[in-house]
Image: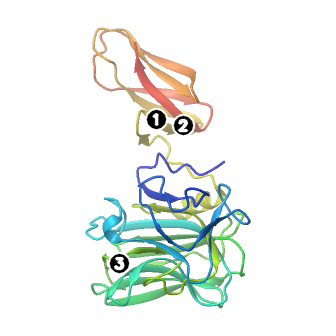
Amino acid sequence: MANIFTYDIHCKALWRFESGALVTDSIGGNTLTNHGASADSSYYMEGSYSSLFERYEYMNITDSNLSTGFPFKSGDTNKKISVCFWARVARVYDGALLSKYDFSSGLRCFSIRYTSAGTFFIQLGYNSGGSYTNYTHGSTFPENTWQHITFSYDNSDRSYALRLRDASGNIVGTDLTGTAANDISITTAPLEVNSYNGGNNAQWGRIDELVFFDDIITAAEATQIAKGNYVPQANEPIPEQLHYYKNGIVNINIYPFSAGIDNYMNITYSGTQVGYIPIVSGNGTGSHPTDLRIYKDGIYTVQSER
């Protein structure tokens, strides 16, 4: 099963790094500018390709070109972020995997980096981007192996997390969690993939399935994403009358077309009707909560009919 990000209202960007769509964000339209990277089918963790970076190669997008509501875009007042991705690095030199961090101009926000010794760490900028603090995960990783990385930060309580999973989606070591000493700085630095500060520390490696949220991904959800079975929360409404339901009893609020007319809610799965809920005449046009038995996890269409 592949991750389902499309119907998550908190998912703001998704780069799958497929051939012909290497720089395409299929969620938020945040198209990256490519500085030499290529789509590679030799090693990947999702789809059929990953992004292959040689030394000095990277991708970026300016802050002004990030979509409205993108986490940590300048002017962001939500100040919550979660970012998840796969990385496979050579570990020849210290490197940067993802950043919004321009130290030359004093515009430090965040960066996710690694050392040649095999440790991952995050940098959080503060003092209007003029200062920073490093937080290092306690585990080391082998070179040229896939690692799944989840970074999250919530400025309301300054909580941060760096979570690592192996190629099978299993937890690596102990998740790094804590509380930052200072509020993070939301700056106008560009978003960079495989580098920071305009191409610095751009090293050999691959990145796959990069996804951004404007909410906090939990430890359990980080594992789900690494294992490829993430879905929006059960019963969370999603656009166009689509809902993700899990096996079990769910509650649906149904809305008739109008009072005094017999009509029903039609429920379909993959284009096939799997049931309907009748609404008798005279029930009115308000919301009518109804329990429904779902036998299979999936995306269902719920639509008023008459």
Q: Amino acid at mark 3?
A: Ala
Instruction: Tell me the tag on residue 189.
Output: 3
Which quadrant of the structure image shows residue 298?
Answer: top right
> Which element type, helix, strand or loop, lies under badge 1?
strand
Position of residue 9 relative to residue 206, above or below, is: above
- Label 2 and label 1: CA atoms lie apart by 7 Å
Does residue 154 appear anywhere in the picture?
A: yes
Instruction: Tell me the tag on residue 299.
Output: 2
Q: Position of residue 269 (x, y in %)?
A: 57, 29
Q: Amino acid at mark 2?
A: Ile
Quadrant placement of the C terminus: top left
Instruction: Tell me the tag on residue 242.
Output: 1
- Is 257 displayed left or right of 7 in the figure? left
Q: Position of residue 176 (x, y in %)?
A: 54, 78
Position of residue 233 relative to residue 293, above or below, is: below
Q: Nearer the viewer, mark 1 or mark 3?
A: 3
Q: Amino acid at mark 1?
A: Leu
For the residue pair 48 and 73, the one nearer the viewer reads as: 48
- Label 1 and label 3: CA atoms lie apart by 36 Å
Residue drawn 40% across the image and 39% down it: 239
- Label 3 and label 2: CA atoms lie apart by 38 Å
For the residue pair 202 and 148, the one nearer the viewer reads as: 202
Which is nearer the N-term, disc 1 or disc 3? 3
Answer whether labels 2 and 1 touch (C-beta < 8 Å).
yes
